Image (cartoon, rainbow, N blue to C red):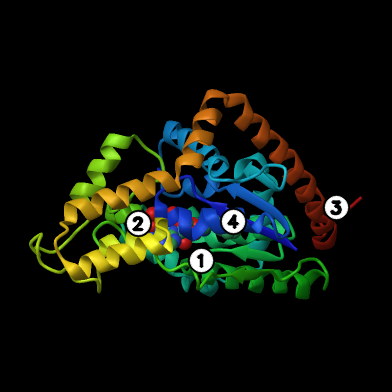
Amino acid sequence: MRFLTGLQPSGQLHIGNYFGAIKPAVELQEKGEAFYFIANYHAMTTMESAAKLKENTISLAVDFLACGLDPKKAVLFSQSAVPEVNELAWILSTVCPMGLLERCHSYKDKVAKGFSPSHALFAYPALMAADILLYNSDAVPVGKDQKQHLEVTRDLAAKINDTFGADIFKLPEAIISEVTAVVPGLDGQKMSKSYGNTLPIFGEEKPLRKLINKKIVTDATPLEAPKPTEGSIILAIYKLFASEEQYKAMIEAHQRGGVGYGQFKKDVFEAYWEYFRAAREKREWILANPDYVTTVLTDGANRAREEAAKTMSRLREAVGLIWH
Ligand code: ADP
Ligand code: TRP
C-alpha cells in the first residue's frame, strides 16, 4: 500500500495542522510505503515572495521531521524537485473537461478570500491529480476540503485509462479521517491561519504562554462560580494534550467552581508545552544540523524521481509522445 500526501508550505504550522494532517501522516508511515511532499508549486498560486516560499519550504521540512516523520520509513521531498509533475499535469489537462474544474470549490473559495484569479489557481486540481498519479499512490490522506480533488483525480485517471490503455493508472482512494475532529481555534471557530486564531506547534515559551492566556475566549463567570463545560474552548483544547484523568479533573473543577479561567489556561499551556517537548528538542537538533534536512530532501527527491521516471516513460509511450 502506498500512501501519498502533500502539504502546502504556507506558513507556520498550527496544532490544527498537527492533529489533522501531520500526526495521521506520521502514523501511516508505519503501515505502508509513505510518500510525503512539500507542495511548493501549489503554494505559488497564493504566494508571490520567493524568499518566503524558500523559507516556508525548508521550515515545513524541519517541522515535519521534528514531529516524527522518519526518513527511513517515509520519502520526503519537495514537489519542485520532480518537475515531471508539470508534464503529467499537462497531459491530464488535455482530458480534463472545463466543467470538472469549474465545479471545484477551492478556486471560488480562494478568489473569495482575495487571491488573484490566475490560471494556475483554476487548474490547481489537475496539478494535484498529477501529484497523486505520478507516484502510483493507492491512498491519499487528506482533509475533507480536499475530497473533491480526489474525485477529480480518479476521473482523470479513468479518462486516461479509457483513452490510452486500461492499466496506465490505478484509481487512488481518499482517506478522510472522521476520527480527527476539527481542532477549534482560540476563538472557538475552526482553527485556521486565515482566521488568525491559531496556536502554533513551535515557538518561544513566553509569547505562547501569553497567547493562550490572552486569546482563548471564555465567558465572564466569576472565579468562585461553577463554569459551563458545554462549548468550553479551554476544555476542547486541553483534551488534545491532557491525559484522561487530567481532562476529567478539569471538568470537575469547572463544575465545582472556585478555580478561575486564568488557572485553567495555565494548565492548558503546561499540557501543550509538555506534549510537544520531544518534538521541540528534535527540532532544535535539526536546526543545529542543517545538512540533515538537505540530505533527507535530496534522498527523498532521488527516490521520488525514480518512481516518476517509471510512470512518465509508460505514459509518454502510451499517449504517443515517443515516436521512435
Ligand atoms: P489553514 O486552514 O490554516 O490554512 P490548511 O488548509 O493549509 O490550514 O491545512 C493543511 C492541513 O491541515 C490539511 O490537511 C487540513 O485538513 C489540516 N487542518 C487545518 N486546520 C485544521 C483544523 N482546525 N482541524 C483539523 N485539521 C486541520
Ligand atoms: N491541495 C492540498 C492542500 O491544499 C495539498 C496537496 C497538493 C495535496 N497536492 C496534493 C494533498 C496531493 C494530497 C495529495 O492541502
Which mark is drawn over residue 265? none
Dot 1: element: helix
Q: Are marks 3 and 1 in contact (CB under 8 Å)?
A: no
Instruction: Report which residue position mark 2 lands on.
Output: 192
Q: Which of marks 3 and 4 is in front?
A: 4
Q: Where is residue 71 in the image (x, y as percent from the top left)?
A: 68, 42
Q: Nearer the viewer, residue 218 or 65?
A: 218
Q: How far apart are marks 3 and 1 (CA)?
A: 34 Å
Q: How far apart are marks 1 and 2 (CA)?
A: 15 Å
* Amino acid found under the numbered disc labelled 4: Ala
Question: Is residue 144 visible to us here?
Answer: yes
In what quadrant of the picture does the N terminus appear? bottom right
Instruction: Report which residue position mark 3 lands on.
Output: 322
- Which residue lies at the image location 50% right of the left edge and 34% below the top edge? 281
Q: Quadrant of residue 76?
A: top right
Q: Position of residue 229 (x, y in %)?
A: 24, 71
- 10 Å neighbourhood of mark 1: few (<14), some, or many (≥20)? some
